Image (spheres, rainbow, N blue to C red):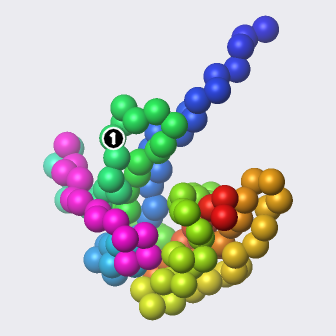
Amino acid sequence: MVAMKVENPVVWFEIYVDDLQRAKVFYETVFHTELTELVNPADDSAIKMLSFPGNMETKGRASGALVKMEGVQAGRNSTIVYFSSHDCRVEEDRVAGAGGKVVRSKISIGEYGFISLVADTEGNMIGIHSMD
């Protein structure tokens, strides 16, 4: 039997968007973070990316990017990325002002803390998780 790893295997995520600048404002406003342009090594003008802070070497925390790519529409998948928070109500309260929508207000998930489900300006559902 192979031993199971105890570390987070997720190292990267992508959130596809239709309007990169509008989505940038939403995520920077809600999470009080700065996204930076990620240079495409393939020099493909059909793909534009803005990266969340982080690096591929950080253990247990994934980084990722907002991505605008020709032929890929926003809001059409069934994967939910959860963002960490001290109290998910704080970020939830910023969602409407940033152009998004609260889908499910802060709820308890028992011993695992709390979550809020929100939609960004592009129709993507994301989660916010906190222990308080």
Q: Residue at x 79, y 8 (%)?
A: 1
- To which residue does mark 1 refer? 55
Q: Which quadrant would residue 107 be assigned to in this image?
A: bottom right
Identify the residue at the far top of this view.
Answer: 1
Is residue 96 on the magenta stretch?
A: no
User: Which portion, as a residue range, is magenta?
Assistant: 29-41
The image position of residue 85, as x and y in percent, is 54, 62
Query: Residue at coordinates 79% horizontally, 62% vertically from top-left?
Result: 109
Residue drawn at the location 38% of the way across and 62% of the way down: 66
In this rendering, the answer to whether 45 lies above or below 124 is above
Q: Vertical placement of 47 versus 5: above or below? A: below
Please say whether residue 78 is visible from this viewpoint.
no
Q: Position of residue 15 (x, y in %)?
A: 46, 61
Secondary structure of the residue carrying tag 1 is loop
For residue 86, side relative to residue 2 (left or right): left
Q: Which amino acid, mark 1? A: Asn
- The outermost residue toward the right is 110
48 with respect to 61 (left or right): left
